[in-house]
């Protein structure tokens, strides 16, 4: 059982780092720092398949869960991510129950889905028993769906009824924009939408995720039932650290002039 699957099954809080740049050392640093997962973004990020596959390998070596954010709820996208060892797929643009069912089918082997048979890294390139992997894969792989539009909120009950969903990850930027209140993260309409997802998902055993940028954010949402937190991206984190660093140095220069 993967660490991510175990944590979700036990309703533990997990915190991950968003990585949208093809930088193996970012994954390595995240592992040393103690994140629970890395979110490897091939949708928005500048990462191709071979780069993502390498990032998965680094994460596995450091014992943190690699989550591969695919470009769409498309069978080839999801198949490649899982065949190269991702512990989970994060699927964007989920608007309807059919979108959700498409994602689940692509991630599960028969009889629960229609995942193609070709697991490279999970079977150590054929050194392990492929049949044995296939028997346990449906339980091990974590399927995460992005909830980020008003259409998804309107259809949330039908989406949650699709078997095989593990996580609803709410995208507050896109969702707030879709609601007509772009980037207003405290707007009542956005908060109501998030609460609706929680009320529908939790009774079904679906974990709910949300961007968690600050300790205050986690303090607010953990008591409400959010346990999956995607934090700031590597370029943003680096830019903030750089700004603080140069500001501290400029302050010394200004004081000495």
Image (cartoon, rainbow, N blue to C red):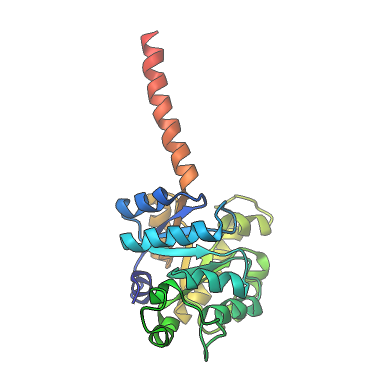
In the shown orientation, is residue 190 left or right of residue 54? right
Q: Identify whether 47 is placed above or below 83.
A: above
Q: Nearer the viewer, residue 162 or 233?
A: 233
Give me the residue at 64% from left, 76% from top.
Answer: 99
- Residue 186 pos. (x, y %): 55, 52
The answer to whether residue 195 is seen in the rendering is: no
Residue 243: which quarter of the image? top left
Quarter occupied by the C terminus = top left
Q: Position of residue 46 (x, y in %)?
A: 57, 51
Quadrant containing the N terminus in the rendered view: bottom left
Q: Residue 16 versus residue 58: which sits nearer the camera? A: 58
Which residue: 64% across, 51% down?
A: 182
Residue plotted at (66% across, 75% down): 96
Please name the residue shown 66% across and 65% down the image.
Answer: 150
Placement of 92 over or under 158, stated as above or below: above
Measuring from the top left, give residue 40's x and y in whole percent: 49, 58
Residue 127 in view, yes or no? yes
257 sits left or right of 198 in the view: left
Front position in the image: 132 or 205 = 132
User: Residue 137's quadrant in the figure?
Assistant: bottom left
């Amino acid at each position: 059982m993967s660490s991510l699957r175990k944590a979700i099954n036990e309703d533990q809080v997990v915190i991950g780092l968003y990585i949208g740049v093809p930088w193996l050392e970012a994954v390595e640093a995240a592992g040393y720092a103690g994140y629970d997962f890395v979110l490897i973004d091939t949708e928005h990020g500048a990462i191709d398949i071979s780069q993502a596959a390498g990032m998965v390998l680094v994460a596995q070596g450091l014992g943190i869960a690699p989550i591969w954010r695919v470009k769409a709820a498309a069978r080839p996208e999801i198949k490649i991510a899982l065949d190269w060892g991702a512990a989970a797929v994060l699927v964007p643009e989920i608007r309807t129950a059919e979108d959700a069912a498409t994602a689940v089918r692509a991630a599960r082997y028969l009889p629960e889905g229609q995942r193609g048979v070709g697991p490279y890294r999970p079977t150590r390139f054929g050194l392990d028993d492929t049949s044995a992997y296939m028997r346990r894969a449906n339980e091990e792989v974590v399927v995460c769906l992005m909830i980020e539009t008003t259409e998804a909120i309107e259809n949330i009950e039908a989406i949650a009824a699709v078997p095989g969903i593990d996580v609803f990850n709410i995208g507050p930027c896109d969702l707030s924009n879709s609601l007509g209140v772009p980037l207003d993260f405290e707007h009542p309409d956005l908060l109501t939408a998030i609460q609706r997802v929680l009320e529908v998902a939790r009774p079904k055993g679906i974990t709910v995720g949300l961007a968690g940028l600050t300790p205050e954010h986690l303090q607010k949402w953990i008591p409400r039932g959010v346990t999956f937190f995607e934090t700031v991206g590597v370029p943003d984190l680096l830019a903030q650290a750089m700004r603080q660093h140069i500001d501290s140095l400029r302050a010394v220069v200004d004081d000495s002039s």
